[in-house]
Amino acid sequence: MIMSKGRVLVALSGGVDSSVAAYILKSQGYEVIGATMQIWQSEDTCDIQSKGGCCGAEAVEDARKVAAMLDMPFYVLNFRAEFQARVIDYFIDEYLRGRTPNPCIACNRFIKWESLLSKALSLGVDYIATGHYAKIVEMDNGRLSIQKDFDNPKDQSYALYNLTQQQLRNTLMPISDLRKDEVRRIAAELGLGTADKPDSQEICFIPDNDYGAFLERSGCGAVEPGNFIDEAGTVIGKHKGVIYYTIGQRKGLGAFGRPVFVKKINVADNTVMLSDNEGVYSGQFIMGDVSFMGKGGLDENEVIEVLGQIRYAHKPARCSLRMDGERIICQFMDKQRAITPGQSAVFYDSDGRIICGGVVEGD
């Protein structure tokens, strides 16, 4: 009898990545259990199955079929209440504060890890596993971190910066060294129905990508129009409500006779400041809600040189970090475009290992 390497609960989204992750773990000798998280409230609102989404009935059925083909147990776990509180309510609150949130990062941290891992451990499972393109590594100081693959366009390290040491110790990421085309090839060779399933592109609870309409439907009240102002504070036009804008935005602002971009959103006086493109570049910001990963923390007067990433598609750039109370001040060597309050900032060492991350507060 072959001894199991441990019991693993794989978060099956109904997509190709988690499907192949489950296959790899089973082939490596783990006892694998599949589970899909039921997180959204109604099928009518989340009708995104044809786009490869992760919360509709068809996604659950796709995951069930994969589990059956791989001959492993399968469960559907209800995390609707947690998703509402931790992801949707947070998303709404951040936009009403004039900030741009990261709902997928919140979902990773609080739903896919905190809630799912807690459930798995209570059931006697040793690990959870996902289909993320990310690699867990051990630092010289003994701490665990996630290492960015700079050459992989699908790398997802940025979205996982706030996982705790315990969560990392109980996590497996079996496709970390693969590329997307390799994952699809493996799935096709196995005859899995998810092999050609397209990647999800939108936020799962906003399938039409219309954030403003979603926020207005979500009970936050009527969105009040306000003034566009220039950098001197002069009124230069009217906006339709602060929830419709984000820092660096150009489209949807109207005609001003020249290219203009959103520089600042002020909820207190309901204004949106516009500037030229140069005006949305800055070199310094303050970061709150700090999570340390590869490093346990920073001493009061310590300054470290790292690579900073300020949004999912941003190329990490050289910068320095120092503590300011419980927050961190980041200073880039070169100014970066559209550093946006509410977005996550993640910092890596020269080898791509996550040192820490947090949420942009402002300059």
Image (spheres, rainbow, N blue to C red):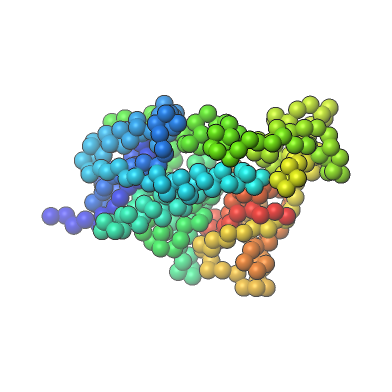
Q: Nearer the viewer, residue 72 or 242?
A: 242
Image quarter in which the N terminus is found: bottom left
Residue 104 position, x and y percent, is 50, 44
Q: Nearer the viewer, residue 183 or 265?
A: 265
Image quarter in which the C terminus is found: bottom right
| Residue at (26, 48) in percent of width and height | 32
Residue 201 position, x and y percent, is 50, 33
Instruction: Examine the rendered structure and indicate whether residue 54 appears above or below residue 174.
Output: above
Q: Total of numbered circles in the picture? A: 0
Q: Nearer the viewer, residue 137 or 241?
A: 241
- Give the quarter of the image for residue 359: bottom right
- Give the quarter of the image for residue 22: top left
Residue 95 position, x and y percent, is 61, 43
Residue 167 position, x and y percent, is 41, 59
Instruction: Examine the rendered structure and indicate whether residue 127 appears above or below residue 71.
Output: below
Image-based side of 124 in relation to 164, left or right: left
| Residue at (46, 34) in percent of width and height | 200
| Residue at (26, 39) in percent of width and height | 67
| Residue at (83, 40) in percent of width and height | 230
Could one spot residue 254 in this view of the protein? yes
Image-based side of 151 in relation to 131, left or right: right
Could one spot residue 18 in this view of the protein? no
As drawn, the residue found furthest toward the left would be 1
Image-based side of 97 in relation to 118, left or right: right
Instruction: Examine the rendered structure and indicate whether residue 115 appears above or below residue 198.
Output: below
